[in-house]
Amino acid sequence: MERIEVLKTYKIFIGGQFPRTESGRYYPLLNKNKKHQANICLSSRKDFRNAVVAARGAFAGWSSKTAFNRSQILYRLAEIVEGRKMQFIEELMQQGATRAQAQKELVLSIDRIIYYAGWCDKYTQVLSTVNPVASSHFNFSIPEPMGIVALIADEKSSLIGLISALIPIVAGGNVCVVLASESKPLCAISLAECIATSDFSAGVVNILTGTAVELHPHFSSHMDVNAVIYCRNNAEERKTIEQNAALNVKRSFYWNKDWLQEQEQNPYYITDLQEIKTTWHPIENIGAGGAKY
């Protein structure tokens, strides 16, 4: 008898754990030859709510880490992905890429993690400011992380689109809930396995699989989400997200990019997801004899 292959069920990633979807649903993933290759969890609204709770619990600890520490953690993630590069290349090829395309996407993804790791402790100095004021005060404006960012990742790419949008979020001290590509989800869950074994705190990154048709209204309307990023090209979904975002004045971004281009990495993707805090501090004037006035 022909052996029946044991297909992997790729679980979701919430709070540092790998649960199955609470709904018990999944969908079969077909490879480029239209052969059933894996089972993918079909996440529900409750899965998303659980992920938001996990992210909120992780925000205080992650945002309070030093920028240099976040940089070290991202660099460690790049090391782990580098060590599993053959797995990622194989998954990219299973989802339609040629070997050359898969190698290019993987190498660029690793380099992009390192790029943002380098910016973790630099973007504040480069992009903050000392403001001129007409009084005896120092006036500083500095970026600070806003909180939970909900990301609906690029549908066209399996890895580089996810990395390019996810890493700037966490590099700036935010936490996130991600909806992976529906048609190319394998690398997203493999990346979650890398995150789980890295130095990331549980809940900083949460990755769901499923459909944007079902989940995009919840990503954009949840009242504890501070920003939502949409990386796909569906006009109706984008319109719904923008309307729902107004309910609690969360920021909404449309990042439908060609992520393979070098210009699609820059520190402004970090500062897009920051709040600007301005601080005033009086200047002590020193007079004759050392008297302060």
Image: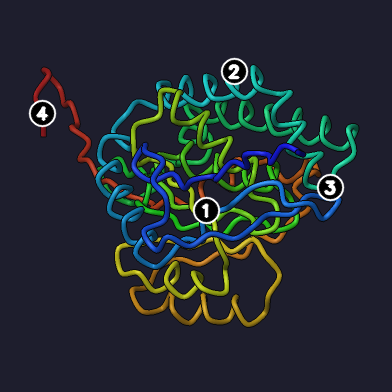
SS at mark 1 in the image: loop
Above or below residue 15? Residue 46 is below
Q: Mark 4 packing: few (<14 Cα in 10 Å), some, or many (20+)?
A: few
Examine the rendering and report whether any part of residue 161 can be seen: yes
Above or below residue 217? Residue 71 is above
Comparing marks 4 and 3, which lies closer to the viewer?
Answer: 3
8 relative position to 258: left or right: left
Q: Tell me where residue 96 appears, x and y as whole percent.
A: 84, 47
Report the residue marked by disc 2. Answer: 79
Q: CA distance from mark 1 to mark 3?
A: 32 Å
Labelled pair 3, 2 in contact (Cβ < 8 Å): no
Report the residue marked by disc 1. Answer: 272
Comes first in the chain, label 3 or label 2: 2
Comparing marks 4 and 2, which lies closer to the viewer?
Answer: 2
Report the residue marked by disc 3. Answer: 96
Q: Tell me where residue 207 appears, x and y as whole percent.
A: 48, 48
The three-letter amino acid code for the residue at tag 1 is Asp
SS at mark 3 in the image: loop
141 relative position to 87: left or right: left
Comes first in the chain, label 4 or label 3: 3
Comes first in the chain, label 1 or label 3: 3
Picture quadrant where residue 94 is located: top right
SS at mark 2 in the image: helix
Report the residue marked by disc 4. Answer: 292
